[in-house]
Amino acid sequence: TGHSPQVKAFVTQDIPLYHNLEMKHLPGADPELVLLSLRYEELERIPLSDMTREEINQLVQELGFYRKETPDAPVPEEFQFAPAKPLPILLPPKASTTDGKTPPKWDKEEHPDL
């Protein structure tokens, strides 16, 4: 298979550091980054075969994936669901806060089953 050493290095050394980033190896397929929504709907596919390891790391971080110091490092609470950016449909009305930093009060109280 034509995996570049760059992509291979990313897969073996970097992927374990990213929270919620999983590698599904398809024999003979070109490596692609498939972005899924919280509902596991496919958002987009990004072919990785021509990218360097550095470029892939940059891309993944720009997409919002959280990179841990070590594979076993704990993930901060606010990154538990990263990088799944909440889709507009999932947001309750009036969810936008003024500065975007303080979560609305309903956040923790009304979701016992999450």
Image (cartoon, grey):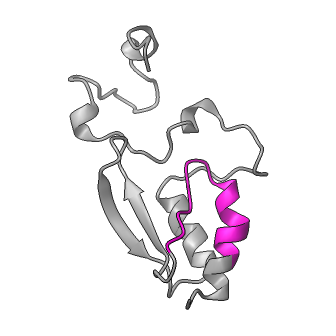
Residue 17: x percent and y percent? 69, 55
Residue 64 horizontal/vertical position (percent): 50, 53
The stretch of residues the image draws in magenta is 9-26
Q: Relative to residue 99, is residue 111 depicted above or below?
A: above
Quarter of the image containing the N terminus?
Answer: bottom right
Quarter of the image with the C terminus in it: top left
Nearest the eye: 41 or 65: 41
Please state which of residues 79 and 40 is positioned toward the viewer in this rendering. 40
Q: Is residue 63 left or right of residue 77?
A: left
Q: Position of residue 67 (x, y in %)?
A: 65, 53
For image coordinates 75% across by 51% down, the residue present is 71
Q: Quadrant of residue 32?
A: bottom left
The residue located at (61%, 48%) in the rendering is 19
Examine the rendered structure and indicate whether residue 39 appears above or below residue 91.
Answer: below
Quadrant hosting residue 42: bottom left
Residue 83 colored in magenta in the image:
no
- Seen in the image, is 20 located left or right of residue 45? right
Q: Is residue 19 left or right of residue 36?
A: right
Looking at the image, which residue sits at the far top?
Answer: 109
Q: Nearer the viewer, residue 102 or 50?
A: 50
Residue situated furthest bottom in the rendering: 2
Expressed as whole percent of the image width and height from the top left, the position of residue 105 reads 40, 12
Vertical side of 86 occupied by 61: above or below: below
Give the number of marks.
0
Residue at 65% x, 83% y is 6
Reply yes or no: does residue 16 show up in magenta.
yes
